[in-house]
Image (spheres, grey):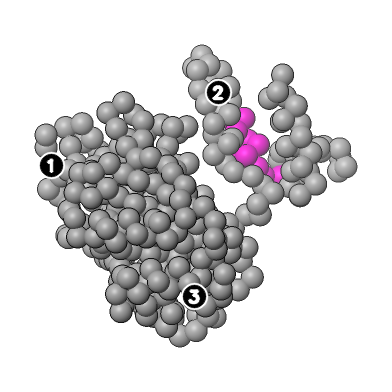
Amino acid sequence: MTEAHAATPTTLPPVPEIAVADTEALDAALRTSDRPFVVRGLASDWPLVQAGLASAETARRYLLDCHRDRLFTVSVGVPGSGGRLFYDDAMAMNFRMMEARLPEIFARVAEFAGQPDAPSIYLASIDMHQYFDGLHEANHIDLGDRDLLSSIWIGTRTRIAAHNDVPNNLAVCAVGRRRFTLFPREQFANLYLGPVDNTPAGRAVSMVDFHQPDLDRHPRFAEAMAVAQIAELGPGDAVYIPALWWHHVEGIEDFNVLVNYWWRDAPRWMGQPQEALNHAMMTIRDLPADQKAHWRAMFDHYVFANDDSVTAHIPEGGRGILDPMTPELASRIRSFLLRTLSR
């Protein structure tokens, strides 16, 4: 095994930091930046942050005071995995998905505190509005008129493999500490992505172990690390991760809480580009080379270039799905695709 010596989390350049005076300044930074940035102390006045600064137990009591009496989905890792929620040798998940009530989950978290080989306990992407009363109202960032998905992530020490998300992401460290290692969008090939359909949490992840990278097996990973940046977040700090940027995430205290906000620049009715990619894998990827070249040109013509030459020769009113996209047109296309895919 060859370890990656060119860069480690301690030697990577930090994500640039900015200061924002108010919500308008934050909104302007989010609208104009196409690269990550860190805002220190953005949520330092949150009650949850203040509870966590008192103690992990105080933070858990605060969350219990707000939680709804319902089952929470929790991931439980195997002991001795170092908090890495990933695949096992058979490419199944090395953690179990379970349901339990929050007091029971927190009792197990407290029981394992301080044990180096304890199993990871991780509540991922919990909708704050559905699972808590008043938590979002008392602990949130004003992001204006964005159509937000507000989630909370709660767990012990964890390592989440590098992945990307379709929406933009503002992630706030509320309790504990978080380490983000970030890579530009174009680094996907150098991260050695795993399966698209068999994933830990819905997105393809890097197969590289960031704590023990094997450059014999993953030589291009050194190229990714050469352009990587790191964001070390403490309580109240936030990092902005633009859409499709790759990020490896570590919770590095015995108890960690993250609150994040996702939003897309495109409306939800446009659907997910990943679905189009999956369909293309099924219908185009294994065609003869000359046919693949034709379909590449067709995609460039209709999707990526998409200039006036595509439709100028077709009378208005007769352009069908070549017209500008609207919710009604998207619904019509979706119905057509469902009919064709069900044949």
Residue under pointer 3: 139
Q: How many numbered tags mark residues here? A: 3
Q: Is residue 11 above or below residue 26?
A: above
User: Residue 282: which disc?
Assistant: 2
Residue at 44%, 79% in the rendered image: 46
At mark 2, the secondary structure is: helix
SS state under label 1 = loop
Does residue 234 appear in this view?
A: yes
Residue 306 is inside the magenta segment: yes
Q: Which stretch did the figure color magenta?
A: 297-308
For the C terminus, the image quarter is top right
Report crowding for label 3: few under 14, some 14 to 19, many 20 or more residues within 10 A (C-alpha).
some
Residue 3: which disc?
A: 1
Residue drawn at x 45%, y 51% is: 100
Type of residue at label 2? Met
- The answer to whether marks 1 and 3 mark residues whose Cβ atoms lie closer than 8 Å is no
Q: Nearer the viewer, residue 38 or 285?
A: 38
Q: Tell me where residue 321 appears, x and y as whole percent.
A: 76, 38
Q: Amino acid at mark 3?
A: Asn
Residue 211: x and y, percent?
Answer: 19, 47
Q: Residue at x 44, y 32 (%)?
A: 198
Of label 2 and label 1, which has the lower sequence position?
A: 1
Q: Which mark is residue 275?
A: none
Which circle's residue, 3 or 2, is located before the other in the chain? 3
Residue 144, position as x, y percentages in the image: 60, 73
Q: Residues within 10 Å of mark 1 (few under 14, many from 20)?
A: few
Question: Under tag 3, what secondary structure?
Answer: loop
Tell me the distance, in whole angstroms, between the alpha carbons under discs 2 and 1. Answer: 36 Å
Disc 3 versus disc 2: distance between alpha carbons? 44 Å
